Amino acid sequence: MGLWIQISSGSGKPIYVQVAEQISEAVAKGELASGDKLPAVRKLAAELVINPNTAARAYSRLEQAGLVTTKTGSGTYVSDPKLRRSDAADINILTERMDTIITRGLNLGLEGQDLIAMFKGRLAKFVNKKAERRKND
Amino acid sequence: MGLWIQISSGSGKPIYVQVAEQISEAVAKGELASGDKLPAVRKLAAELVINPNTAARAYSRLEQAGLVTTKTGSGTYVSDPKLRRSDAADINILTERMDTIITRGLNLGLEGQDLIAMFKGRLAKFVNKKAERRKND
DNA sequence: GATATTGTACTAATACCTTTAGTACATTAT
DNA sequence: ATAATGTACTAAAGGTATTAGTACAATATC
């Protein structure tokens, strides 16, 4: 597997956020499955030409989100999805973010139906990726 | 109309963002309609006990988003929704944010159907507010 | 026209965030 | 043992964000 992570300096987002987001998305799409090992922080840092500390910070963020498990001396692994249970605070943040999106969409002149259609459309891209992956297993 | 804007110091969000977001949401829900005049920056600043510059910055952000129109010497007014057309860049940002939410939701163990249900649920709160408002007009 | 009201522009200071760098340490794999 | 892994800590440098203060320009009101 080549390294699909792309760092964009003009993105406005910090490097460690970009790395964490792209890994998160890969997990959500099933491109990274439970148990998969992530590159070592020093290796990832070398390939992306960033500081090892920055790579470690991305992993730290992912671990805090419960998405990966780290074992010193062994590596960082995608954690079991069944152990990633959502608590009330997580759901609250999710709904707040939905409200923000809905606010923005409605104020752009979109209708509620448009927003639902968009949301389903984006969601399909995730589910399809997962389905493709299951086929190839 | 009393002042419904609530500033929370522990929110992590800058004051001007909080103000702009709450006004945006009010517009999306129809609590503020096209043509409505917003409080003057100094008046808003005095009521919220913030710096007038901070209030002005919130308005500036809303104007950049096309949500309000400002006339120096006159005031700041909610703009006509029909003039708030969405361009490609706006839609792109919207879909990116949807992807972020979907990523987070799926990684929390939620199913696609759960996310769609949540999204519709949140959207309903906006549409209902608009319907209530139309009734009272 | 005079005055008040409104939004804007500019500077400055403070604080925070990000990134990099360097070093050292504990744990695990080989 | 040796190598490889993640972690912890400090430090410095640079940039950005936020707020505050002051002065200015345009409009409304009389």
Image (cartoon, coloured by chain):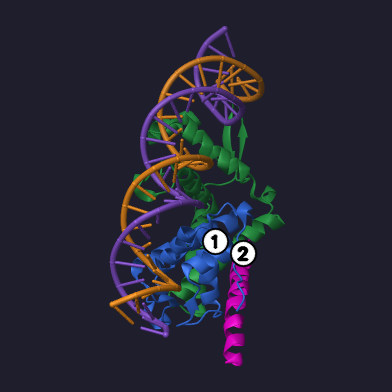
Chain colours: A green, B blue, C orange, D purple
Q: Which residue is mark 2?
A: B6
Q: Looking at the image, do the residues carrying marks 2 and 1 touch, with CB atoms under 8 Å apart? A: yes
Report the side of B66 relative to C27 (left or right). Answer: left
Q: Which residue is mark 1?
A: B18
- Of the 4 image quadrants, the one containing the N terminus of chain A is top left
Q: Residue at x 63, y 52 (%)?
A: B10
Q: How many residues crowd around disc 2 within 10 Å: few (fewer than 14), some, or many (20 or more)?
A: few
Q: How many residues crowd around disc 1 within 10 Å: few (fewer than 14), some, or many (20 or more)?
A: some
Viewer-side residue, C29 vs A58: A58
Q: Say whether disc 2 or disc 1 marks the residue closer to the N-terminus.
A: 2
Picture quadrant where residue B22 is located: bottom right
Residue B135 in magenta stretch: yes
Q: Amino acid at mark 1?
A: Gln
Examine the rendering and report whether any part of residue B67 can be seen: no
Viewer-side residue, C27 vs D27: D27
Q: Secondary structure at mark 2?
A: loop
Say which chain tag 1 marks: B
Mark seen at residue A102? none
Viewer-side residue, B72 vs C26: B72
Q: Residue at x 48, y 35 (%)?
A: A55
Residue B34 in magenta stretch: no
Q: Residue at x 57, y 35 (%)?
A: A76
Q: Magenta residues? A: B110-137
Q: Magenta stretch: dominant SS?
A: helix
* A47 is higher (above) or lower (below) than B58: above
Task: Name the spot of residue B105 as percent of width and height, x first.
Answer: 59, 58
